[in-house]
Amino acid sequence: MLLADFGTTYCKLFDTQRDTRARIVASRALEPGFQADLATGHNAARRSKRAVNELSALARGGRRLISADSFVLLDCGSRDLKFVRFAQGKVVDMGWNAECGASMGFTIELLATYYQLDYAAMAVPQSGFSITCGVLGMSHIFDAVVQGSSEEEAVARFVRGIALNAHRFAGAPEEVYLSGGLCDNPLFVACLPCTVHLLGRFVLLEGLLDLLGHEKGHIQL
Amino acid sequence: MAEQVGIVGVPPLEVIAALNREGARIFDLDEPQPQIRAPIEQSAAWVPRVYCAILRTVVLNAMLLKLDRIFIDVGPGKCDAALNIAEVLDDMLAIPIHRTHNQDRIPYGFPLCTSAMPMVEKFTLISKSVQKATPHQPREPCTPLCGFWGVPPRDFALLRLFPEQTHVFGWARCMENKTPADLGLERQFDPSLPTVFFTQTFCAKSALAHHLGRRHPQALVIDCDVSPSNSARAKIEAFLELSGVPSPAGALL
C-alpha cells in the first residue's frame, strides 16, 4: 500500500510492501496522475484513494513516536503550522494556522536560495522581527537591509521572528516535539525559545501507519 | 397578497403569533436566501466587510428582498451589533423597521436539539421553528455522541461534519426553546460530551464560547466567518475523530 504525505513543496512517500525508508520527492516533480492509496496533506483529496485529515495524522503519529503521555507536538511545514497537545494520553487542544502562519517554511527556503545562505552556518540573532506570516515578514527584511543590516542578519531575524510566532501559536510550551521540514533548519530550531525534540519529516506518515494498525518502528527516521 | 416580513434574531412570540394570524410570509434574514445569488460583498455598501457574516447577510437580504417591514430583535436575546444594524436598515429602506426586545421566559422545550437527525436538517428545523408560535412536536431524545454549542452558522456546510447524534447547546437551544435571552440556558453544556464551541467570527458571543470552552474538559473553540475554512473543517474533523466520535457518512476521515 502506498502511503503519502502530500505537502505543498515536498511529498513524503512510503510503500508498506517495498520500502524500508520513507522517500521525499518535490511535489512539483510528481506526475499529474500520481495516486497514493492512503494519504494526508494539502493534495491528498485529489491524489489518493482515501484522504486522512492532517491534524488527525499528526496526532496519531505523535502518539506513536513520543513515549510521554503529556506533550506538545508542533508541525512546521512549508505552508502552515499545526500543533496538537496531549494531556494524560488524550488530545486536549489543537490548532492549524493556515492563514496567519501562511507560507513560513516556503518563504524561509526561498530566501536561502535567493540570498544564497546556509542556515547551518548562521548565528542566532539577538532579536527577531515581529511577524505573523512569511509574506508580510518579507518587507521587514527589505527594510532592515535598507537600514544597513546585512542580508544574512536580516534573514536570521526573520527566521527568529517566525520561530517565536510558531512557539506562541503552540501555546508557548517549555518543551516541544517538532516535526516537519523545518526540523532540518538548524537556525530555526535554535531560535525556538524552549527545549526542542526533533522528530523529523515523517510523523504524518507514522500517523497513516497507525491508522492501518502497523506496529511502531516501520519507518526509519 | 400576503405581507412579506423579514425577521432578524428571534422576535417575541406575540409578534410571531400575530404574523401567523395575519398569514404573513416570514423571511429569516439571518440566513442566506436561496433566491438571492448576489455575493455577500454587495453588503459592503452599507456595512463593513470586517463584520459578523450573519449581520452582513441580514443587510444583503434586506437590500434585495421586496419586504413590507422588518422585525429586528435588539434586546439581550440577540446582540449589540443588531442594535446598530437596525439603524442601518432604517436609513437604507423606506419600510417600517420594528425594534423588539424579546424577554420571553416561557420554555417551549428543545426536542430538536436532543434528537438524532442530520445536523443540517436539525438546524433548518430549529431556524424554521422561530417562525411559528405553536408548540413543538415531541421527539425521542437520542444518546449523544458529541455536542455542538453555539448559534446556527452562517454556512450550514459546517454542520455536515457532525454525526446525527449531536446534541445542540447554546443560543440555538434558546432559539428552539423560544427564550433567546435566557443566558442560563445558553451557558449550559454537558461536560461528558466532547463539544465544539462555535461562534461566528467578530461575534461578541466568542467571549462566552472561550469562557465555557476553558471550563469544559474536552472542548474545541472555533470561529468561522462567511464559510468554514479548510483548517476550521480539519480541526473539527480531527477533534471529533480523536475524541472517538465516528465521522458521519460523506465527511473526510
Image (spheres, rainbow, N blue to C red):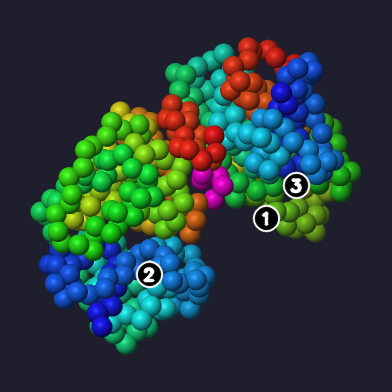
Provide the secondary structure element on which disc 3 rests.
Answer: helix
Query: Which residue is drawn at the image coordinates 43% and 26% (left, top)?
Result: B244
Q: Quadrant location of the N terminus of chain B?
A: bottom left
Which residue lies most toward the bottom here?
B94
> Is residue B83 at all visible to an observer of this figure?
no
Q: Magenta region's main secondary structure?
A: helix
Q: Quadrant location of the C terminus of chain B?
A: top right
Q: Image quarter for residue A73?
A: top right
How dense is the environment of label 1, judged by Cα within 10 Å: few (below 14), some, or many (20 and up)? few
Please state the chain letter of the residue tagged with numbered disc 1 in the rendered image: A
Tell me the CA gap for discs 1 and 3: 10 Å
Left or right of A123 on screen, residue A52: left
Residue that mark 1 sits on? A136
| The magenta segment | B229-233
How dense is the environment of label 2, judged by Cα within 10 Å: few (below 14), some, or many (20 and up)? many
**Residue A57 highlighted magenta (yes or no):** no
In the image, which disc is placed on residue B58?
Answer: 2
Name the residue nearer the viewer: B54 or A162.
B54
Tell me the CA gap for discs 2 and 3: 40 Å
Q: Examine the rendered structure and indicate whether residue A192 appears above or below residue B250.
A: above
Count of labels shown? 3
Name the residue nearer the viewer: A105 or B245.
B245
In the image, which disc is placed on residue A107?
Answer: 3
Provide the secondary structure element on which disc 1 rests.
Answer: helix
**Residue B230 highlighted magenta (yes or no):** yes
Q: Examine the rendered structure and indicate whether residue B95 appears above or below residue A220.
A: below
Closer to us: mark 2 or mark 3? 2
How dense is the environment of label 3, judged by Cα within 10 Å: few (below 14), some, or many (20 and up)? many
Q: Amino acid at mark 3?
A: Thr
Left or right of A198 on screen, residue B134: left
